[in-house]
Amino acid sequence: MRISELTDVRAERPGAVAEAAAARARRAGPPGAHGNLMIIAADQPARGALGAGGDPVAMAGRADLLERLCVALGRPGVDGVLGTPDVLDDLLLLGVLDDRIAIGSMNRGGLAGTSFEIDDRFTAYDADAIAAARLDGGKMLLRVDDADPGTAGTLENCAHAVSGLARHGLMALVEPCVAHRVEGRVRNLLTPEAMIRAVSVASGLGVTSAYTWLKLPVVPEMERVMAATTLPALLLGGDDAGETVGAGDTEAVLDGWRSAMRIPGVKGVVAGRSLLYPPDGDVGAAVDAAVGVL
């Protein structure tokens, strides 16, 4: 199927999404059974975060985003994708998720820039829907803001999601951080001490941690951060860590990944905008460079 056909198929045959999910060839075993992972992240638009590389609406064109995702998923060494239902449904219809790991993004209610951003409701996938769609896991964002009461509800909902995914034997990918507001905007604290606290909180969520993985930014003294848990972790970086990646920053991001990949417990990389919207526009080369880190 071509990208230009997606809207007509959605209008005329909405059941085609479920058919594609049922027919998808899945990898055998759990996500970590085949070595280190390279996952492409494409869940930012559903949070209203459309900017990349200095362009505030870089991700606004869905056909362009899907083209970039198809390029990325076709590169050697790429294991899969992380996305919201609308994105994964498109990729299922396009037939590009065979033998790829597909992780559904779950809580997207904390829209970027809103007063309720920390009260991050689960408005996308739930655990049962992820299992029914034959996906490989679910991802959730957990921002701990001591001054925002919305943190409590997000903690509870993340715990329920971890438990629900575990009941299905599916990966729960938790992205924890300590956050606070600066001039009204939510900012992550990327210090070793803040990340150690966030990792410790996230590790204890749910009725079991057997299927829990962490999604972590590369911060100073990363060895100390990873020493706070026995859970496997995937690295995020660049725009996914809340930073703008420019031409001079790309190598610094790769160096950070290279260094952190030497730490026991680090099992791969999850990257989105920094690879899909690189400064030079060459998605394939950006993805290949990231795969080289593994």
Image (cartoon, grey):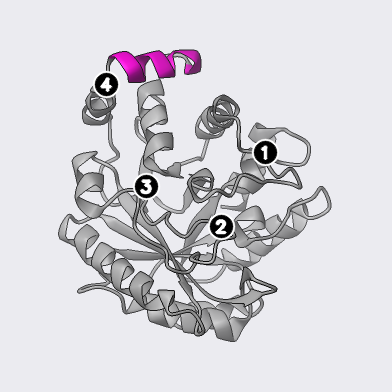
Query: Can you give x and y, in whole percent of width and height, for residue 92 in the image?
Result: 36, 28
The residue segment tinted magenta is 3-12
Residue holding disc 1 = 58
Which residue type carries mark 2?
Ala
What separation in Å lies between label 1 and label 4 (alpha carbons)? 29 Å
Residue 248 sits inside the magenta stretch: no
At mark 4, the secondary structure is helix
Residue holding disc 3 = 103
Which residue type carries mark 3?
Ile
Residue 11 sits inside the magenta stretch: yes
Which residue type carries mark 4?
Ala
Tell me which numbered mark, 4 or 2, is placed earlier along the sequence: 4
Tell me which numbered mark, 2 or 1, is placed earlier along the sequence: 1
At mark 2, the secondary structure is loop
Residue at 61% x, 68% y is 218
At mark 1, the secondary structure is loop
Query: Can you give x and y, in whole percent of width and height, for residue 40 in the image?
Result: 51, 44
Tell me which numbered mark, 1 or 3, is placed earlier along the sequence: 1
Classed neighbour count for the residue bearing mark 1: other residues with Cα under 10 Å, few (<14), some (14–19), many (≥20): some
Residue 275 occupies which quadrant of the picture?
top right
Query: Can you give x and y, in whole percent of width and height, for residue 115 in the image?
Result: 54, 66
What numbered label is drawn on residue 112?
A: 2
The vertical placement of 14 against 189, above or below, is: above
The answer to whether mark 1 and mark 4 are in CB contact below 8 A is no
Tell me which numbered mark, 4 or 3, is placed earlier along the sequence: 4
What separation in Å lies between label 4 and label 2 (alpha carbons)? 32 Å
What numbered label is drawn on residue 16?
A: 4
The answer to whether mark 4 and mark 2 are in CB contact below 8 A is no
Which residue in the rendered view is the most extreme toward the left? 167
Classed neighbour count for the residue bearing mark 2: other residues with Cα under 10 Å, few (<14), some (14–19), many (≥20): some
In the visual, does 26 lie left or right of 146? left
